[in-house]
Image (spheres, helix red, strand yellow):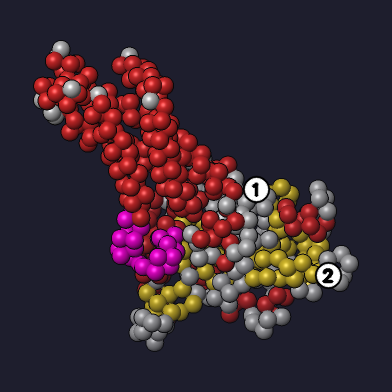
Amino acid sequence: MNDMRYFRQALALMREEKLYSAMYIAGTALAVAFVMLIAEVYYVKVADIAPEVHRSTTYYLDDMTLLNNEDYIENIHYETYRDLFQKMQTPECIAAEMEMWSNTLFGITLADSVHEYSVKGKLTDTGFFRLYQFHFIEGAPFTQDDFDNGRNNVVITEDLRDHLFGHGQKGVGQTLTLDDHTYRVCGVVETPSVLTEKCVADIWMPCTIEDPLRDRGVHGIEMPIRLAFSVPADKRDAFLQELKDIEARYNALHKDAPVTITDRLQSHYEQVWHDIGYIFNAFDVSLFWYVAPAILLLLLVPALNLSGMVASRMERQLSEMAIRKAFGAKRRTLLGEVIMENLVLTIIGGIIGLCLAWTALYGWRDWVFYVFSESDNLYDTVPLLKGEMFFGPAVFAIALLVCCVLNVLAATLPAWLSLRKPIVESMMIKK
């Protein structure tokens, strides 16, 4: 019942003091919009968004560090992966990707046999499609038998299918000519957004096929690969121990060049944090002192302005508060009313600010994500944004937290200072 009374009082305040309310809401909206724009960008980078639905439990391993010389690394080759890592028990799934040809441009010869269409390709294994949950419109991923025998079966995106064979035409069973070699389409997936950087491509091929590698003068098993593991939270310790066991077995076979593995392992969150470090040219703990002040500044400056407005309004209401205190109203009750009235205005401004952030994110997505990322995938690209990238529990929790912080900073302190004044002094100020 009291909450409804506070809400009605806030609405009455908005009607009576339109300029004050408009400025308060606008100040809150701009502060929330700036903070939420940054939060949204990094939410898209870390949230479990399809196809990268296992980000929160994913760990990456690109190479190993030589113990004899920490400045040098040892690549993970396919044979090492097959003999050691592929047999691991703790990960739910393991994905291998040929590192050198991650997002390599391949040329597809079009139907006129003259023009070529450049596409980004990934050479992967079958675990790749278990880790990354693509939505298959047609067909299925290449099988383990296809992988083991190096068959030229490939998965392509819906956009590539439409470009090559015509909009709405069937893709599975069709053939395409890539770098002068023929491949058969075994599956068509919904085109992923470039913002899902770990899995995005136009075409996915088994990393055991020889044609594209032979053309570049290498053999598949000689190529370095990167690994991705999906590990449930309750198995993390067992996973790390299993990696240490693998490290011991590897070093027993390579006594002249022992390595360490776990120090090269990174979670998805750690990789994103590392990418932020490149942007600020700072790493580890020092990065916090770049990011935190920026966020606080975005909140503190508007909070100080709003606090001045609240203090000015409180000065005008001191006599009313003094009379109510004289008739027995408790300071806690009066303070609660002021906070709740301002909280309503803050939430209204927060909702508007969140909508502004969404609008800016969508309208300027071609450069907003590039500015906050070191990825070449986002250069000169308009990324596809999906609904789940905008709406998520974490986004609303951050928005609510920002609104509450602004309200506490802007309304509570000036109201508390004003209500501490004696009743007689408050009534004399009014006179």
Q: Give the range drawn in magenta.
A: 270-293
Whether residue 157 appears in magenta in the rendering, the answer is no
Q: Can residue 173 be seen in this view?
A: no
Which of the two marks, 1 or 2, is nearer to us in this view? 2
Question: Element type at marker 1?
Answer: loop
- Please give the name of the residue rendered at 25% of the width and 24% of the height, measured from the top-left corner: 317
Question: Element type at marker 2?
Answer: loop
Whether residue 290 appears in magenta in the rendering, the answer is yes
Tell me which numbered mark, 1 or 2, is placed earlier along the sequence: 2
Q: Name the residue under label 2.
A: 115
Disc 1 residue type? His
* Coordinates of residue 376 in the picture (x, y in percent): 57, 67
The extreme front residue here reads: 431
- Please give the name of the residue rendered at 36% of the width and 84% of the height, measured from the top-left corner: 69
Q: Mark 1 points at which residue?
A: 135
* Residue 310 drawn above or below residue 380: above
The extreme top residue here reads: 327
